[in-house]
Amino acid sequence: MRINLSPQMRDDSLSVSVAGDVLTVNGEAFDFTPLPEGATLPFGAVDSEWFAGPVSREDGLLTVTLLLPHKPNASSNVTFPEPIMTTGDGPVSLPVNLNAIEEEILANDDN
């Protein structure tokens, strides 16, 4: 599965996991098994605020675009994320805000 990310400044968080053609987003499962080869579900066809584009299957590869929430001072790996290619079932590792980690380390060093 290819997961494209569309960054958006917002206060909530995102968790994603994959099991075959089932994508679970913040605890809600979306089963794309019925989507045939060459088909596309247009943006808005999936009833979830987290989907930010169409869902398609081409050459057997399922492609989705999800919103990626971030805080105001997000690092470039979050604001300009690379697509994620899943290689198996399980949780999906999303980009981490490196600026927030650095700020936390600096704050702990000051104590």
Image (spheres, rainbow, N blue to C red):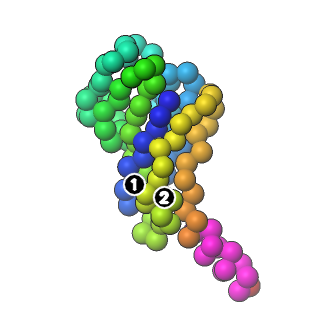
In this rendering, position of residue 20 left or right of residue 52: right
Q: Is residue 109 magenta?
A: yes
The majority secondary structure of the magenta stretch comes to: helix
Please say if 14 is above or below 10: above
> Which residue is the site of mark 1?
7
- Which of 71 and 1 lies nearest the eye of the viewer? 1
Q: Which residues are magenta?
A: 100-110
For label 2, the SS is: helix
Quadrant that contains the C terminus:
bottom right
Residue type highlighted by circle 2: Val
Residue 26 visible in the picture: no
- Which of 19 and 4 lies nearest the eye of the viewer? 4
The percent position of residue 89, horizontal first and vertical second, equals 62, 28
Residue 90 visible in the picture: yes
> Which residue is the site of mark 2?
78
Give the farthest residue toward the front: 59
Instruction: Count the marks.
Output: 2
x 38%, y 49%: residue: 6
User: Label 2, label 1: how many angstroms apart (C-alpha)?
Assistant: 7 Å
Q: Are marks 2 and 1 in contact (CB under 8 Å)?
A: yes
x 57%, y 34%: residue: 86
